[in-house]
Image (cartoon, rainbow, N blue to C red):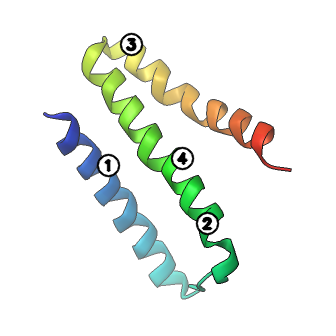
Amino acid sequence: MTLETMIFFRQFLGTLTVAIIVGLRGEWQLPSSSNFPRIFLASFVGIVLHQWLQAQGMLTTTAIVTSWLSALAPILIACICWAWLP
């Protein structure tokens, strides 16, 4: 599986899951336009960059190290949020 295919399917399944949950709950609201730059930056760092780095690691390492990467990702993201967000 290529890197692009892996990222596409992970994004597709994540988007589908969120859309189903939001659709079932019926609680969708658009954020205010002043928040769009922060949302865009957070989306890029938290989704695009993270997905690319994780997929790159999955393609170049063993299954054990891949499981460690997947398991420790939320901790790394929490540390980054703690450092960047006020």
Q: Earlier in the sequence, mark 3 or mark 4?
A: 4
What SS does tag 2 mark?
A: helix
Q: Nearer the viewer, residue 58 or 83?
A: 83
Q: Earlier in the sequence, mark 3 or mark 2?
A: 2
Note whether 26 is above or below 5 in the view shown. Answer: below
Q: Is residue 44 left or right of residue 37?
A: left
Residue type marked 2: Pro
What residue is shown with label 4?
46
The answer for how far apart the CA atoms under marks 3 and 2 are is: 37 Å
Q: Is residue 57 left or right of residue 1?
A: right
What SS does tag 1 mark?
A: helix
Q: Residue placed at 86% from the left, 50% from the top?
A: 86
The answer for how far apart the CA atoms under marks 3 and 1 are is: 20 Å
Q: Residue placed at 38% from the left, 20% from the top?
A: 66
Q: Residue placed at 25% from the left, 22% from the top?
A: 59
The answer for how far apart the CA atoms under marks 3 and 4 are is: 23 Å
Q: Mark 3, mark 2: which one is toward the viewer?
A: 2
What residue is shown with label 2?
37
Q: Which mark, by number, is residue 10?
A: 1
Q: Which image quarter holds the N terminus?
A: top left
Residue 54: give x, y in percent of width and height: 40, 30
Residue type marked 3: Ile
What SS does tag 4 mark?
A: helix
